[in-house]
Image: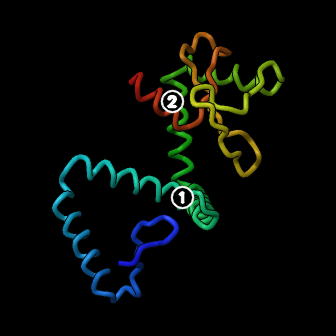
């Protein structure tokens, strides 16, 4: 191994191709390592994090968004699905009148300008990307539905985390 004259560290040798025996040996050892460690909690956690990172990158690509939107529209255009959806909404309104009332008051105050929606999440401080139509993706979280204008504006991740904590 030759030394790099500037840093006096060994130079990193790149493999000439994917058929290089050194590359194949490394690949085989990494596969064996994955096979040995696939049941360990630390490996599962690391794999889940990398899978999530890949999914989030893929999810935000335009082709993926267009395909998902087309599938969603096709699904929701079915008469049976629309009826089911209406029925589900009616059931929710009957079961949770205080939530429906609070949402209505909040949306009215937003429309009339009594309340302004902030740009940042009030928990983590991130600025979420706007929707296709330009509206903000921030969500209102009511801690108490009897106070409809007392809300925290959260991104979807923070809102989900808070709701999981309370359930």
Q: In this view, does 29 lie above or below 93?
A: below
Look at 65% across and 41% down and name the residue there: 128
SS for callout 1: helix
Q: In this view, does 160 lie above or below 144?
A: below
Residue 141, position as x, y percentages in the image: 58, 24
Name the residue nearer the viewer: 130 or 13: 13
**Based on the displayed image, in which of its 4 quarters is residue 140 positioned?**
top right
Q: In this view, does 7 lie above or below 118?
A: below
Label 2: which residue?
92
Residue 132, position as x, y percentages in the image: 72, 52
Look at 42% across and 73% down and name the residue there: 3
Please rate how many residues cluster around mark 2, counting C-alpha atoms within 10 Å: few if below 14, some from 14 to 19, many from 20. few
Quarter containing the C terminus: top left
Please rate how many residues cluster around mark 1, counting C-alpha atoms within 10 Å: few if below 14, some from 14 to 19, many from 20. few
Residue 134, position as x, y percentages in the image: 77, 46
Label 1: which residue?
57
Q: Check the image and name the residue furthest to the left.
A: 36
Residue 56, position as x, y percentages in the image: 51, 54
Q: Check the image and name the residue furthest to the top.
A: 146
Look at 57% across and 64% down and name the residue there: 64
Name the residue nearer the viewer: 18 or 6: 6
Looking at marks 2 and 1 on the same chain, the residue that comes earlier in the sequence is marked by 1
Colour scheme in use: rainbow
Spatial separation of the CA atoms under disc 2 and disc 1: 34 Å
């Amino acid at each position: 191994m030759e030394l790099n004259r500037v840093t006096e560290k060994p130079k990193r040798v790149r493999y000439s191709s994917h058929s290089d025996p050194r590359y194949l040996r490394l690949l085989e050892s990494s596969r064996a390592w994955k096979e040995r460690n696939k049941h360990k909690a630390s490996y599962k956690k690391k794999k889940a994090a990398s899978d999530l990172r890949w999914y989030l990158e893929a999810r935000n690509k335009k082709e993926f968004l267009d395909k998902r939107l087309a599938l969603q529209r096709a699904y929701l255009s079915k008469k049976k699905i629309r009826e089911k959806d209406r029925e589900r909404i009616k059931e929710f309104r009957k079961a949770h009148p205080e939530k429906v009332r609070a949402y209505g008051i909040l949306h009215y105050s937003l429309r009339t300008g009594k309340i302004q929606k902030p740009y940042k999440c009030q928990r983590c401080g991130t600025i979420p990307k706007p929707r296709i139509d330009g509206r903000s993706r921030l969500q209102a979280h009511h801690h108490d539905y009897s106070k409809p204008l007392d809300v925290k504006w959260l991104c979807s991740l923070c809102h989900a985390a808070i709701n999981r904590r309370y359930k």
